[in-house]
């Protein structure tokens, strides 16, 4: 069994970058990424890629047209491949049983049925999407009813890349995980990754462990963010400094230094949905205490987002009605244009509800994306939102600046200019602790940092 031709269904944040790296590192394998979204495919074939990731453009430029192709020809691409990755979205269900928690598996099922119909000969079917444990059973059940000499092996190969560092993560992964029942099929997929990943980082497990490990990894990571955010509130109440606490605990090799940065909460398309999926599955398996334990990670995260907005209002004399507030950063983290579940949505909606005027600036998020993210989340008055082309313009005339994403350019803003252009008394709210607090305070601006001791002008 040797993989010579790959079709990846789903040209999103995972499918696009992952397949670009496979094509780049395996010039002998033909890789076709397909999607029902023709606009997205056109963008992948253009100079303006639909996903912003440092390093992605170079990789795509090297491989596109050589052995990497983006296409809407789904059926023929499935037919020509001997390995089909499923990398479609698996959002939280919004209807019926499990609404608000369970994963919506209709896209997975649609793809699987299409693979069943159009695959030829023997095909490896690889779950790349994050799925509920036991999803492979469904995939196998659908594939098992086809005849005409078609055979399939189903593998789970979850993706652990983080947005903003996707290319780095793909080139140099901590591990590649392959779950399967057939060792020959696992070995065939492992051979693809072995082109650039050291063998001791390619793990094989049974199917269910692989599916479970993906959900568990995201739950553990999100739990760390909620843990440090919980402590950030406690620090503010006591005068402790969350960064000093994080540094002190991170030195313990059992805890480690990563993922201990306090923030306005975690965002992104996956942490919340994957934990809610875990919660749903635990409830389904009669484990209510386990479900409640994990659900608290999401509850704390929601609380932290609202807490930040509440703090802004409180510091501005308990009213922001009619006040201009600069929002610096709208993406859920730096180095991505992704706004899915960004904490900025909750913070902005809360401030809008209080009557604020928001001047939003993000280097990679367009005004249309800001408006659509906010409109999607709740009723908004577009007259209260301005999207401006620079941080300086956002801050001009503002009563407060709220830094929500830690874009590098925010570290070197011209605070002297900003200080003279803001309405006094001016406030800066740094939810990433990425600014030079001492310098800003010296300019006469009040500064609140998440989890930091209260404003002391030095
Ligand atoms: P995405 O929404 O960016 O992309 C999914 C794509 O699948 C869309 O372009 C959609 O049009 C396409 N699609 C849906 N149904 C289809 C069908 N029947 N045929 C063809 N195309 C179809 O999603 P994403 O962020 O790439 O995530 C994909 C999966 O990977 C999810 O399960 C997610 O949990 C998981 N994941 C995401 C990340 C991340 O950083 N975004 C990281 C690891 C894992
Ligand atoms: C996360 C995981 O890190 C990936 O391993 C996983 O593959 C991916 O989810 C997924 O399954 O989708 P991602 O959401 O892209 O990746 O980005 P992270 O770096 O994990 O950040 C998630 C959120 O947590 C961001 O809003 C970030 O700002 C926040 N965060 C992260 C903190 O607030 N503090 C931290 O210390 C770390």
Image (tube, grey):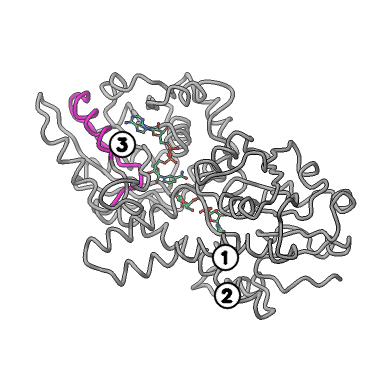
**Which mark lies nearer to you, 2 or 1?**
1
Task: Write down the region rendered in magenta.
Answer: 106-132
What residue sits right under mark 1 in the picture? 260
Q: Residue 367, position in %: x, y?
A: 64, 35
Could you classify mark 3 by the number of other residues whose Cα lies within 10 Å: few (under 14), some (14-19), or many (20 or more)? some
Q: Secondary structure at mark 3?
A: helix
Q: Quadrant of the C terminus?
A: bottom right
Q: Secondary structure at mark 1?
A: loop
Queried whether the magenta region covers residue 343, the answer comes back as no
Residue marked by disc 3: 107
Which type of secondary structure does the marked residue at label 2 adopt?
helix
Q: 93 and 67: which one is in front?
A: 93
Q: Where is residue 430 drawn, in percent x and y?
A: 70, 59
Residue 294 in the image, given as x and y percentages of width and height: 38, 66
Residue for point 67% across, 39% down:
383
Q: Looking at the image, is mark 3 or mark 2 earlier in the sequence?
A: 3
Quarter of the image for residue 312 reads bottom right
Closer to us: 233 or 191: 233
Q: Nearer the viewer, residue 236 or 13?
A: 236
Query: Which of marks 1 and 2 precedes in the sequence?
Result: 2
Q: Mark 2 = which residue?
A: 249
- Give the tally of numbered discs: 3
**Front-lying residue, 399 or 153:** 399
Does label 3 point to a residue whose CB lies under 8 Å from ligand 1? yes
Asked whether mark 1 and ligand 2 are closer than 8 Å, the reply comes as yes
> For the residues marked 1 and 3, what is the alpha-carbon distance in whole angstroms?
34 Å
Up-down relation of residue 117 to residue 420 (above or below): above
Answer with left or right where residue 219 lies relative to residue 151: right
């Amino acid at each position: 069994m040797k993989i010579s031709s790959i079709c990846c269904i789903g040209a999103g944040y995972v499918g696009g970058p992952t397949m670009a790296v496979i094509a780049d590192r395996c010039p002998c394998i033909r890789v076709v990424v397909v999607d029902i979204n023709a606009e997205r495919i056109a963008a992948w074939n253009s100079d303006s890629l639909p996903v912003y990731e440092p390093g992605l453009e170079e990789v795509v430029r090297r491989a596109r047209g050589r052995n990497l192709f983006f296409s809407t020809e789904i059926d023929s691409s499935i037919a020509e491949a001997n390995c089909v990755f499923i990398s479609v979205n698996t959002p939280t269900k919004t209807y019926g049983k499990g609404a608000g928690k369970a994963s919506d598996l209709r896209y997975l099922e649609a793809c699987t049925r299409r693979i069943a119909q159009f695959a030829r000969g023997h095909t490896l079917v690889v779950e790349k999407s994050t799925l509920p444990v036991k999803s492979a059973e469904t995939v196998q059940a659908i594939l098992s009813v086809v005849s005409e000499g078609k055979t399939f092996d189903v593998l789970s190969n979850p993706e652990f890349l983080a947005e903003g560092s996707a290319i780095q993560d793909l080139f140099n992964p901590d591990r590649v995980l392959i779950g399967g029942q057939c060792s020959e099929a696992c070995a065939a997929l492992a051979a693809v990754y072995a082109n650039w990943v050291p063998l001791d980082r390619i793990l094989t497990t049974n199917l269910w462990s692989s599916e479970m490990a993906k959900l568990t990894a995201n739950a553990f990571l999100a739990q760390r963010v909620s843990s440090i955010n919980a402590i950030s509130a406690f620090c503010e109440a006591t005068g402790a400094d969350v960064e000093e606490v994080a540094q002190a605990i991170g030195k313990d090799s059992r805890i480690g230094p990563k993922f201990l940065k306090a923030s306005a909460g975690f965002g992104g398309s996956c942490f919340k949905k994957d934990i809610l999926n875990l919660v749903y599955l635990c409830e389904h398996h009669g484990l209510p205490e386990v479900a409640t334990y994990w659900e608290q990670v999401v509850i704390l995260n929601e609380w932290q987002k609202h807490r930040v907005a509440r703090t802004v209002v409180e510091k501005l004399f308990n009213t922001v009605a009619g006040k201009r507030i600069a929002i610096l950063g709208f993406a859920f983290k730096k180095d991505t244009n992704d706004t899915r579940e960004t904490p900025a949505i909750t913070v902005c909606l809360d401030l809008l509800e209080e009557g604020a005027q928001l001047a939003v600036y993000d280097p990679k998020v367009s005004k249309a994306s800001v408006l659509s993210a906010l409109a999607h989340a709740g009723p908004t008055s577009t007259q209260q939102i301005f999207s401006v082309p620079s941080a300086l313009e956002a801050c001009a005339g503002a009563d407060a600046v709220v830094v929500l994403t830690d874009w590098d350019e925010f570290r070197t803003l011209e605070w002297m200019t900003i200080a003279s252009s803001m309405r006094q008394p001016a406030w800066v709210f740094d939810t990433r602790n990425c600014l030079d607090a001492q310098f800003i305070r010296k300019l006469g601006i009040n500064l609140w940092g998440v989890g930091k001791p209260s404003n002391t002008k030095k």
